[in-house]
Image: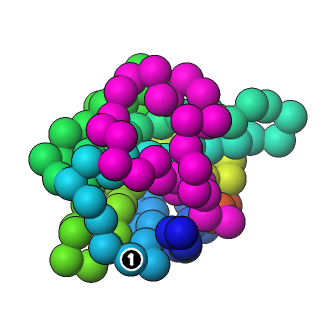
């Protein structure tokens, strides 16, 4: 079992930045896949980025590539999402997810069902 706890959400004006954190309850395996998703009211959960905990290899959704950066600090059992140039359409609940000892693949971002463990979410609100 893995518990995930997100933090760092808040309200920001368009063009601003936020950094989200996801703390894991235990250490990682090199082939664990960590991800960030978001869900706006009335919309499906959208995959944003994945990171392989061992190599640090990343995959991004087209909607956020170049603006968002996923990273990890294995010593702290924490994954981050740096979000820059935020837009009102980025307003959503942001979730951290984990899939253990599986590697990462781009199609994992297409279906939240690939991930076994989820945090409770952190709200991000971007005003114009």
Asked if residue 17 can be seen in this view, the reply is: no
Please indicate whether residue 72 sits to the left or right of residue 83 in the image: left
Model colouring: rainbow
Q: Residues within 10 Å of mark 1 (few under 14, many from 20)?
A: few
Residue at 47% over, 29% down: 108
Q: Is residue 57 magenta?
A: no
- Residue 63, given in percent of the width and then of the height, sits at 47, 25
Furthest residue toward left:
55
Q: Which residue is mark 1?
A: 26
Relative to 7, residue 56 above or below: above
Q: Residue at x 47, y 53 (%)?
A: 98
Q: Using the image, determine if residue 116 lies above or below residue 46.
A: below
Q: Which residues are magenta?
A: 95-120
Residue 48 appears in view: yes
**From the image, which quarter does the C terminus lie in?**
top right
Q: Image quarter for residue 19?
A: bottom left
Q: Residue at x 68, y 47 (%)?
A: 92
Please state the total of marks drawn on the protein image. 1
Q: Is residue 96 magenta?
A: yes
- Residue 122 vertical placement versus 49 (above, below): below
Residue closest to the eye, 82 or 49: 49
Which of the 4 quarters of the picture holds residue 124? bottom right
């Amino acid at each position: 079992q893995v518990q995930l706890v997100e933090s760092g959400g808040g309200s920001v004006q368009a063009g601003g930045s936020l950094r989200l954190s996801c703390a894991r309850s235990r250490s990682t395996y090199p082939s664990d896949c960590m991800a960030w998703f978001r869900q706006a009211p009335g919309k499906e959960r959208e995959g944003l980025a994945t990171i392989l905990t061992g190599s640090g290899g990343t995959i991004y959704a087209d909607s956020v590539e170049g603006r968002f950066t996923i990273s990890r600090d294995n010593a702290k059992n924490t994954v981050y999402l740096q979000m820059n140039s935020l837009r009102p359409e980025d307003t959503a609940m942001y979730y951290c997810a984990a899939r253990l000892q599986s590697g990462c693949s781009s199609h994992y971002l297409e279906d939240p069902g690939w991930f076994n463990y989820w945090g409770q979410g952190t709200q991000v609100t971007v005003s114009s």
